Amino acid sequence: MIALEKRPTPSRAWSAAAPLLAVALTMVAGAALFAALGTDPLAAIRTIFWDPLFNEQFASYSRPQLLVKAGPLILIAIGLSLGFRAGVWNIGAEGQYIMGAICGAGVALALYPMDAWFVFPTMVLAGALGGWAWAMIPAILKTRFRTNEILVSLLLVYVAEQILASMSLGLMRNPEGGGFPGSRNLQQYPAAANPELVAGTGMHWGVVAGFVAVIAAYILLNRHMLGFQIRLAGQSPRAARFAGVDPNRLVMICLGISGALAGLAGMFEVAGPAGQISIDFNVGYGFTAIIVAFLGRLHPVGILLAGLLMALTYIGGELAQFMLGLPAAAIQAFQGMLLFFLLGLDVLSNFRVRLGRRKVT
Amino acid sequence: MNRRTLLASAALAFGLGMSGTAIAQDKTKVGFVFVGPIGDGGWTYEHNEGRLAVEAHFGDAVETIYQESVPEGADAERVLTQMALSGADLIFTTSFGYMDPTLNVAAKFPNVKFEHATGYKRADNVGTYSARFYEGRAVQGHIAGKLTKSNIVGYIASYPIPEVIRGINAAYIHASKVNPDIQFKVIWAYTWFDPAKEADAATALIEQGADVILQHTDSTAPQAAAEKAGNVYTFGQASDMAEYAPMPRVSSIIDNWAPYYIDRVQAVIDGTWESDDTWDGIGAGMVKIGEITDAVPAEIKAEALALQEAIASGAYHPFTGPLNRQDGTPWLAEGETADDGTLLGMNFYVEGLSGEIPQ
C-alpha cells in the first residue's frame, strides 16, 4: 500500500531537486520513445542536448541562436512568475506578445522611412504599452467585476490573433509586397531594426532586456516591499490582507508588469528575428513561457536557466528532426514530458510517500 | 602482429577512412522544409512524395533530409541555416511564408542552391517554382456547377493571397458558365492545415446550404465532414484523397512535384543548375486531375475531361475574356487571355462573386 501524506511545509530539497530529476526522467522516457521509433536513443539525446552546444559543424551558429530563442521566453516568463507567485494567473501572454509587436511595428511603419534616433526607443515604449494595455483588460475586469483572469486573458489571445491577421492583410500590409499579406520587413529599415548587437553572438536588445528583467525581478523579490507583498499574497492571502496588501492593486501590478514584458518581447521579436508583422507571427512563446516559469520554480535565476534549457530542446529538436529523421510530433512529446514529470515530481515536495499499511485513525 | 602489418593495417584503415569521407562528399544532399506534417494527406504529403521519388530515382547518389511543421518566420531561417551548415547542396522550401528567410539564408550560403515554392523573389542561388493549380480549379468549377442542386458552392479558403484568390476566380468562372444561378460562399480559415478549423468551416458551409465543398486547405477533415453530412460533393486538394472516393470526393487536384524535383536535383549533380522561375500546369504534368468517380454522371465527366484536355493542349486558357472585375470594371476583352503578371498578383474577385477579400 502506498500512501501520500501531506507535509506540513513543502520540502525545500524536493522543490530544488524536482527540475533536475524531471530533466533526467525526460531523457530516460524520451530515449525509450526514440528507441520505439527506431532511432538510436543515445544519438537522439546527444543531438538534442549536445550538438547545438558543441558540434563543430553547427555550434558556432546554434549557440547564439540559443539566446535568440531563449530571450523572449525568459522576458515573458519573468513577468508571468511575479503574477504566479501572487496567485494572479495570466495565461494570455501570447496575446500581449502579439499586441506589443503590433504596437511596436505600428510606430515603425507609421514613421517609415524617417531616419531618426528616437524611432527605436519609441517602438520600445509602444511595445510595452501595447502589452500592458492588453493585460489591463483582464485586470480591470477582475478587480471591478470579479471575472476570472485565467479565462479572460486566454480568450483575448484569440482576439489578438484576429487583430494580427487583420493588420497583416490591411492596415500594415506592405504596399510594395505584390498583394501578399505581411508588413514591410523592419530588418531592412535601419532606424527601426533590432539587429545583433555584436555579430555572431545572437545578442539583440530583447536578450539584453531579458537579462535585465532577471536581475530586476531578483532585486524586487528579495529587497523590495512589493516583492514581499507578492510572495505573501501567494503564500497566504489572508495574512496578506491583514498586513495591509491591497489585492486589487496587486492584480493590476502583476498583470501590468507581465503584460508589458510580454509586449516588449513581441516588439523586440518583430523588429529583430521575425522582421515583419505576418499572420503567423506568433509561434507560441507566450504559452511556452508558462512552462519556463514553472520549470524555473518561479525564481528569476531558475527561469534564466529554464529558458536556456527550453531553447536548447527547440534547437536540438530541430537538428534531431532532419539529422535523424525524427518526426516533429516526437520532439513536441519530448518537450511535453518535461512539464509532465515536473508537475508529477512536485507532488513529492508537498507530500511524503509512505509505504506500508495505512494506519486506521 | 608484427610491426609491419600493424603499419599496413593502420595505413589501410586510414585509406578506408579517407575514401569513406570522399564517398560521403560525393553524395548530393537535398533538404526539404515542410510547413505541415508529412502525414497531412495534402500539400506537404505530396511534397514528401516528391522527396521519396528523388530518393528512389537517384538511389545512393543522393541523400535527402527534411523537417516538417516548420513555422513561417524566424524559426524557418534557423532551420534553413542549420540545413545548409549540415552540408545540403540543394534545399527546397515548400511554402510561401519561407520567402524572406530563404533569401536571407541564401545570401549567407552562395554555394547552396535554394528552390522556393510559390514565391516571387529570386536570387542567383534562389529559384522559384509553382504549379498552375487554377487550371485544375477550372475543371473543378465545371463539375461543381453541374452537380450542385442548391446552387450554393462552399469554398474553404486558406489565406487571401493571389494563389488562393486565383483558384476561387477560376472555379467560379467555370461554375457560373454552366450554371448562371450559382453562388459561392467563401470561408477564410487562415491556415493551411488545421483539421478542426477545416471541419468547422465545412460544417458551417453545409449548414448554409452548400452541397459542393471546394477546399484550399490541406487536410481531409472537410471530406470527413461532408461524408457525415451525406449528399455533399468534395474534391481532393493537393493530394488525391482517394480514401473518400467515390463519395463525397468525386475528383481532385493532385500536385505532382516528383518530375520537377528529380530534374532539379539532376541539374545540381550535373552542375547546370541555374536560378529560374517555373510555373507549370496540367500540360507539363505538374498538376493532375484525380480520377472522376462514378458519382458524377458520364456526360458531365466527359465534358470535364474535354475541358482538361483543352487546357493541357493550350487550346483554352481558363482566364479568357470577356471577364469583368467584381466591381463591374472590364478586365479582359472578348477572346483576350490573362497575362501571368496579373495572375501572379491577383488581388480581386471576378464579377459575380459576392463578399469581399479580407483587407
Image (cartoon, coloured by chain):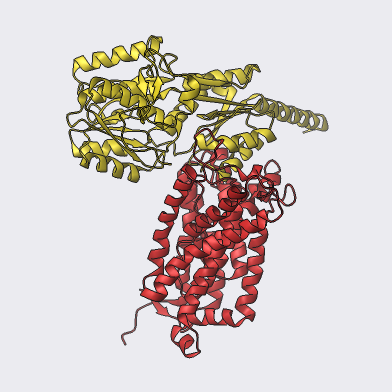
Chain colours: A red, B yellow
- Extreme residue toward the right, this view: B3
In this view, the residue in front, B16 or A331, is A331
| Residue at (69% x, 53% y) in the render | A203
Residue at 18% from the left image edge and 36% from the top image edge: B230
Residue A22 in view, yes or no:
no
Residue B348: x %, y % from top left:
41, 31
Q: Residue at x 51, y 72 (%)?
A: A254
Quadrant location of the C terminus of chain B in the rendered image: top left
Quarter occupied by the N terminus of chain B? top right
Task: Farthest residue to the bottom: give it.
Answer: A242
**Image quarter for residue A43?**
top right
Rendered view: B30 above or below A50: above
Left or right: where does residue B228 sit relative to residue B326?
A: left
Tell me where residue A175 sits by quadrant.
top right
User: In the rendered image of this protein, does residue B27 appear above or below residue A87?
Assistant: above
Q: Say how many tags the image has.
A: 0
Kindly tell me whether residue A198 is visible in this rendering: yes
Q: Nearer the viewer, residue B284 or B257?
A: B284
- Residue B205 x/y as whole percent: 26, 40
Residue at 55% x, 21% y: name it.
B277
**Residue B9 locus on image (x, y percent):** 75, 30
Residue located farthest toward the front when viewing the structure as drawn: B329
Q: Position of residue A2 (x, y in %)?
A: 38, 73
Up the image or down, A277 lies above or below A12; here it is: above
